[in-house]
Image: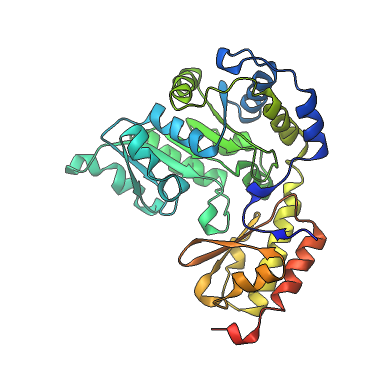
């Protein structure tokens, strides 16, 4: 019996339709812009998000780093959320790749942060937002919030990049079109290899001039792949067939969160469980819970010293949810705090 793998939504295996599309993909040299399947994927992504252009790249981290290189200026600050992926989980790439430093802030501090250069603080050249916000149980950022935050930044002549790794989860949870969530932003990236279930790849979308600069940097960073249409074909299937079903992941995540909260009250904030991620307070869980669950063939992990994470995706069906919940009941009572 396969394990119920809740470590991430990056662990999904390509669907049968994806495998067929990959086998039959028409390919060319993407470094020369000649791969027709990559070009189709990029056109589809740009159309879905209402941008002028798009660029298919291997990973979400590369997409974020390309956007930061293209939009920010060396020797400046880039604003972000306190636990943003660009700040916490990209190995300080922005400092090395773009010569900038990330400055985490709460959105309530945005106005004063933007005014900082007038008070001898570092210049700010970019604001990044994350939708969904992974560290807060994948909380979606509503259109009105994105509009307000981006509006403040633009009023200060600061561009905005959206790390939309799970953008389509946000759109489904909020009941809005993805393009509405990113319309106020200058660039956006989203992952095909997370909730959408493709085996590899992310897409950076934005204006033609920015995407062309990002394309050049993609090659400099070693992302000039060749017949990439083989994997881009799976990305097209993901966009065409895997978006609406994200609601199932959201429902299962909430059911699992409720099961956690029933057993260890206060370990999760159910109000934040709106997409496919459940972040639980590690101190409120049995200390050996990850080892205990692993023995029951249920896998999970942590994202920092204080947070245990469970992520639902296309490879976890109702039976997988039931197995995960049943495993909670077999966590030994002697391991309770």
Q: How is the image coloured?
A: rainbow
Give residue 249's position: percent from left, percent from top: 72, 54
**Residue 28, placed above or below residue 5:** above
The answer to whether residue 227 is left or right of residue 13 is left
Compare residues 146 and 129 and report the one nearer the observer.
129
**To which quarter of the image does residue 311 belong?**
bottom right
**Residue 132, placed above or below residue 162:** below
Give residue 257's position: percent from left, percent from top: 66, 67
Q: Say which residue appears at 64% left-offset and 36% top-offset.
A: 200
| Residue found at the very far left of the displayed protein | 120
Question: Which quarter of the image is occupied by the N terminus?
Answer: bottom right
Q: Is residue 184 visible?
A: no
Q: Say which residue appears at 64% left-offset and 74% top-offset.
A: 292
Q: Is residue 56 visible?
A: yes
The answer to whether residue 221 is left or right of residue 332 is left
Give residue 276's position: percent from left, percent from top: 66, 54
**Residue 291, placed above or below residue 137:** below
Q: Say which residue appears at 50% left-offset and 75% top-offset.
A: 283
The answer to whether residue 63 is left or right of residue 82 is right
Give residue 117's position: percent from left, percent from top: 22, 40
**To which quarter of the image does residue 72 belong?**
top left
Count of numbered circles in the view:
0
């Amino acid at each position: 019996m396969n394990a119920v793998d809740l470590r991430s939504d990056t662990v999904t295996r390509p669907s049968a339709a994806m495998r067929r599309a990959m086998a039959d993909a028409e390919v060319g040299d993407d470094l020369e812009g000649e791969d027709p399947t990559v070009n189709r994927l990029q056109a589809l992504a740009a159309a879905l998000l209402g941008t002028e252009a798009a660029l298919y790249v291997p990973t979400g981290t590369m997409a974020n780093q390309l956007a930061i290189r293209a939009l920010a200026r060396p020797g400046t600050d880039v604003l972000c959320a306190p636990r943003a992926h660009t700040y916490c989980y990209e190995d300080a790439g922005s400092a090395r790749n773009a010569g900038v430093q990330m400055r985490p802030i709460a959105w309530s501090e945005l106005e004063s942060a933007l005014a900082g250069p007038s008070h001898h603080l570092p210049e700010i050249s970019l604001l990044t937002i994350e939708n969904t916000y992974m560290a807060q149980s994948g909380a979606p950022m509503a259109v009105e919030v994105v509009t307000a935050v981006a509006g403040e930044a633009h009023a200060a002549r600061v561009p905005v990049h959206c790390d939309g790794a799970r953008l389509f989860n946000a759109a489904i949870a909020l009941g809005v079109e993805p393009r509405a969530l990113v319309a106020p932003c200058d660039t956006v990236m989203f992952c095909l290899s997370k909730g959408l279930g493709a085996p590899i790849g992310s897409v950076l979308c934005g204006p033609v001039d920015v995407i062309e600069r990002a394309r050049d940097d993609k090659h400099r960073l070693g992302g000039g792949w060749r017949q990439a249409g083989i994997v881009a074909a799976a990305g097209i299937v993901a966009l065409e067939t895997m978006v609406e079903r994200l609601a199932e992941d959201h429902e299962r995540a909430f059911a699992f969160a409720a099961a956690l909260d029933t057993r260890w009250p206060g370990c999760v904030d159910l109000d934040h469980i709106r997409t496919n991620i459940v972040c639980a307070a590690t101190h409120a869980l049995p200390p050996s819970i990850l080892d205990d669950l692993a023995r029951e063939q249920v896998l999970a992990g942590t994202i920092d010293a204080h947070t245990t994470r469970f992520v639902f995706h296309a490879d976890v069906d109702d039976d997988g949810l039931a197995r995960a919940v049943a495993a909670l009941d077999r966590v030994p009572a002697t391991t309770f705090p």
